[in-house]
Amino acid sequence: MKRGIVPGTFDPVTSGHLDIIFRASALFDEIVVGVAQSEDKNSGPLFAVEERVGFIEAATQHLPNVSVRAFDTLLVVFAHEVGASVAIKGLRALTDFEREFQMAALNWRLDPKIETMFIMAIPEYMFMSSSAVREIARHGGSVRGLVPDIVCDALEHRLSEAR
Ligand code: PNS
């Protein structure tokens, strides 16, 4: 039984993240999506961790081997907690490489038993990010298709509250 984790902040989950989760679920017996609380990331996430977990649960409910959990520990500790030995990350443009390379090296230093594996983003999602989605939505642009519909509706609602 090979179990992997797909970790991230997912604020909010995008179609690019979901593509990585779907592809990882085809490669592993079980995938646990780990949603980092990241309460201290800049000014804090737009969506609470429970909301971010809920969006991914809704978008992956057709995949019986995918579950979603929040975590607020080191990634390698979370991996052990859920019995996973591989962390799967998506790689987009070259700009991701340095940060991901650093995180993979640090995680290896913290616990070499946890392997990091990368899946390349498909060209369609190469330039997509949660921060770009938030920025487009904040300025009134449409993000339909870039995120699941449930997230699109939640973004419209959340940002209209803030106006
Ligand atoms: O979506 P993100 O922001 O690229 O995800 C980053 C994440 C959550 C994977 C990373 O911040 C993380 O692993 N956080 C847990 C804390 C940790 O283990 N840090 C040490 C590794 S650098």
Image (cartoon, grey):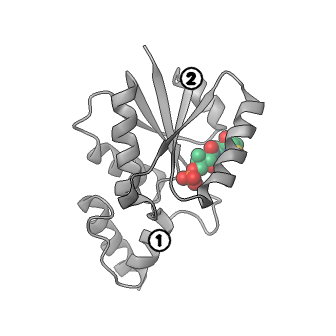
Choose top left, top right, bottom left or bottom right for residue 15.
bottom left
Q: SS for tag 1?
A: helix
Horizontal and vertical percent for residue 51? 39, 54
The extreme left residue here reads 62
Q: Identify the residue at image location x=49%, y=33%.
A: 5
Viewer can see residue 1: yes
What quarter of the picture does the C terminus occupy?
A: bottom left
Q: Identify the residue at image location x=63%, y=26%.
A: 114
Asked if the residue at label 1 sits under 8 Å from ligand 1, the reply is: no
What quarter of the picture does the N terminus occupy?
A: top left
| 29 w.r.t. 61: above or below | above
Residue holding disc 1: 132
Q: Identify the residue at image location x=73%, y=38%.
A: 105
| 48 w.r.t. 138: above or below | above
Amino acid type of the residue tagged 1 in the rendering: Ala
Viewer can see residue 46: no
Left or right: residue 154 versus residue 93 is left
Asked if the residue at label 2 sits under 8 Å from ligand 1, the reply is: no
Q: SS for tag 2?
A: loop
Residue holding disc 2: 85
Front one among 35 and 86: 86
